[in-house]
Image (cartoon, rainbow, N blue to C red):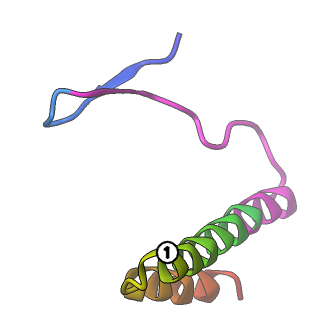
Amino acid sequence: MAESIELNTMTKLPHLKLIDGTFTPTEAGRVLLSLVKSKIDYHSLERLSNEERFGSDHSHSEKRIQELEELNR
């Protein structure tokens, strides 16, 4: 059973392992780069969605995309 994390709001969230396993250095690099790419895709969609629906400021997503793209090089 998953452990819980207690937050200041007294809300409990499950403790999940994001990545679990034994990897060679090459495999680990691929796994991490895949995760970074997924985060870039998420922020790109979030930016577009917020822009289309709300016309809202998307500077956080823009900044995060730039940070993640630096990791992806």
Q: Which residues are magenta?
A: 11-33
Residue picked out by circle 1: 53
Residue, far front: 53
Q: Is residue 34 above or below residue 69?
A: above
Residue in the foreground of this view, choosing between 32 and 10: 10
Specify the quadrant of the image occupied by residue 20: top right
- Where residue 17 appears, x then y in whole percent? 58, 35
Task: Judge left or right: residue 25 versus residue 39.
Answer: right
Residue at screen point 70% across, 65% down: 38
Which kind of residue does numbered mark 1 sit on? Answer: Arg
Residue in the foreground of this view, choosing between 53 and 47: 53
Residue at screen point 42% across, 18% down: 3
- Where residue 16 appears, x then y in whole percent? 53, 32
Q: Is residue 37 above or below residue 20?
A: below
16 magenta-colored: yes
Q: Secondary structure beneath disc 1?
A: helix
Residue in the foreground of this view, choosing between 56 and 4: 56
